[in-house]
Image (cartoon, grey):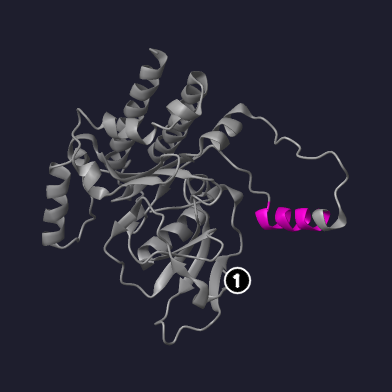
Amino acid sequence: MATNQRQLDASTLKAFENAAAGHDGVMSDPSGELIIKPTTAAEISFYQNTLAEHPDFAEMMPTFMGTLQLGSPASAPSSTAVHEPDKITQAEKDQQLLHGAKISSEKAIVLENLEHSFKSPNVLDLKLGARLYEDGTKADKAERLDKVAAETTSGSLHFRIAGMKVWNGSTFDTYDKFYGRKFNAQNVQDGFATFFSGLATGLKLEQAQELLETILAEITKVRHMLEKYESRMYSASLLVVYEGDSGALDSLMSHEPRARTEERAPTQKEVRRSIVEEEEEEGEEPVAFKVKMIDFAHAQWAPGKGKDENVITGLKNVEKQMDQLIGKLEQQ
């Protein structure tokens, strides 16, 4: 497939420090709109194959903008070409991660930053599956991952909280991968309650219930998509993002138009500034939440092998946790 080229100034890339979970070495562009993630050939292939063969599932993934060749700091050119597909459907927008070992790779994927359209994004990373490694994994690594699964909800519920961050009104409270490892099947609901705690102060009861039900519907949509296809997605994650700023969230859920600040006719300077701002936004509207699948370094489409029950079971149990939260609201 032929590619177009888009330029990124390599000297302006910076470390991406806002993730809820994932690997070190992730970068962002100066605008914060893009994530540059060192990766493997397998993950690049999965993104490309999904766009070509399963465009409906691509809607459940981050926007894949293309690939970037990484170089050593000493030899990195000032402008680096991003190789991108000819067609990027509007459907595949977004991404986000939090801090495992740095991936050793000279190749990176360029993805849209899931958090960019939010004022104060609350982010939850849920690692899916009881088995977290693919066939051919070294025995010592497989043993280590089996131990983690056995000691956490990965083993009992086929998912665990890999990390999250929650806006408390003035700063973010962050929860690393060890936070999620302390839960068991009986108390993991506490982690979900912490993540969605902002809804109690930012929304009316019926609005909070509506938001949770809509997020649940998106999670169910992801599961139905995986039940439709045959795949294996080891150590993939479900990412949930919602607006943590109470004022912004209330406005989004109330569907209220922005109030006019003035009635006088705008000046030419104000008109020009408005046009520039609209062009920069490229039509991206603020949303109350996003739900996406991320992390596909060990993922592949697997015709003939059946549904990925390892991941599907995890999604079903995440749905149950959401149902419990909604049920508690209904009792209030």
Decide if residue 224 is on the left or right side of residue 234.
right
Crowd class of label 1 (few under 14; some 14 to 19; many from 20; radius 10 Å): some
Mark 1: amino acid: Arg
Residue 77 lies, with reference to residue 8, above or below; the image says below
Residue at figure coordinates x 24%, y 55% from the top left: 134
**For mark 1, what is the residue?**
6
Residue closest to the eye, 114 or 206: 206
Q: Quadrant of the C terminus?
A: top left
Residue closest to the eye, 158 or 180: 180
- Quadrant in the rendering for residue 263: top right
Decide if residue 173 is on the left or right side of residue 94.
left
Is there any visible trace of residue 331 in the rendered image? Answer: yes
| Residue 278 within the segment the image draws in magenta | yes
Which stretch did the figure color magenta? 271-282
Spot occupied by residue 172 in the image (x, y as percentages of width and height): 40, 46
Residue closest to the eye, 256 or 320: 256
Residue at figure coordinates x 54%, y 71% from the top left: 83
Residue closest to the eye, 37 or 17: 17
Q: Quadrant of the N terminus?
A: bottom right
